[in-house]
Image (cartoon, rainbow, N blue to C red):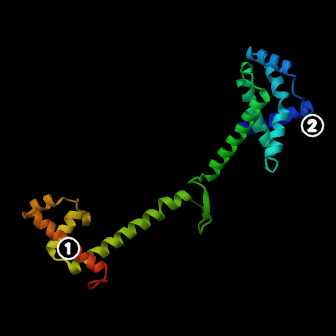
Amino acid sequence: MLLTLFTVLMRVMHLILGIGTPQNFPPPLPREEEQECFLRAEQGDEAARQKLILHNLRLVSHIVRKYYSTAKNAEDLVSIGTIGLCKAVDTFNIRNGAKFATYAAKCIQNEILMNFRSQKKLAAEVSINETIDMDRDGNPLTYIDVICSDEDIAEEVDRKMMTHKMRLYMAHCLSQREQQILIMRYGLDGVVPQTQKEIAEKLKISRSYVSRIEKSALEKMRAVLEGKTENPA
């Protein structure tokens, strides 16, 4: 919004001043006059500041035409570059001995490059409320609709199917004691997972015995899954 307003103001100013083309931009100020304007601008002289901006607009146009001539939004880039020029005028220190044109050119380039990076970042972002399709009734279907329904349902169905299949395998190839220990050990059927020590205390058997039963049960399950023994499916 701010950039759009700035673009309109710049175009209006160009029309008022008769600088609609690069050839009509005011020429650069002589070095002595430029330094005087900077000194006045440091003291808060807005007229001197505006004069520095106006007489360096040619530099903005030159950079856009030289480096971004194929860009579709060349006029917008001139406005963006002008923002960089304004920053250059406000931050340039004449006491450093550098040429203002060199300093301003870097500021203008940086402002344009920052705009490109910003646009690229925005282009990669997707709103979860963005319409991606229409349902049978003609209502918009958004990303959030898909994320909040289909994916959760699919995961829940898949989890239940896998759990049911695993329980069939266990009932087919494991003893009641082996099933009980795996259920307690890995938290199946809604049971809270427990350590071998906790299971041993509840079943009143040794921890090493729990470990042997668990190992044996897992080997039987692995054999079924690898097809080495009969599959119950």
Tell me which residue sits at (22%, 60%) in the image: 193
Residue 36, percent from left and from top = 82, 16
Callout 2 amino acid: Gln
Left or right: 190 in relation to 110? left
Residue, x 17% and y 72% (percent of image)? 178
Q: In this orientation, which residue lies closer to the viewer: 149 or 138?
A: 149
Q: Residue at x 70, y 38 (%)?
A: 110
Where 212 sits versus 18, above or below? below
Determine if residue 1 is in view: no
Element under label 2? Answer: helix
Of residue 43 and residue 92, the one placed in the foreground of this image is 92
Give the label on residue 176, or none.
none
Could you say where residue 99 lies in the image, as x and y percent from the top left?
78, 26
Label 1 or label 2, whichever comes before in sequence order: 2
What mark, if any, has residue 23 been given in the picture?
2
* The image quarter in which residue 185 lies: bottom left
Give the spatial CA distance, label 1 vs label 2: 87 Å
Say whether residue 87 is left or right of residue 155. right
Task: Provide the secondary structure element on which disc 1 rests.
Answer: helix
Q: Are marks 1 and 2 in contact (CB under 8 Å)?
A: no
Say whether residue 124 is visible.
Answer: yes
Which disc is residue 217 wearing?
1
Quadrant of the snapshot with the C terminus: bottom left
Q: Tell which residue pokes out farthest to the bottom in this image.
A: 230
Q: Position of residue 223 (x, y in %)?
A: 26, 79
The amino acid type, in three-letter code, at marker 1 is Ala
Q: Count residues near mark 1 (Cα–Cα under 10 Å), then give few for <14, some for 14-19, many for 20+.
A: many
Q: Give the quadrant of residue 112.
A: top right
Q: Residue at x 77, y 18 (%)?
A: 41
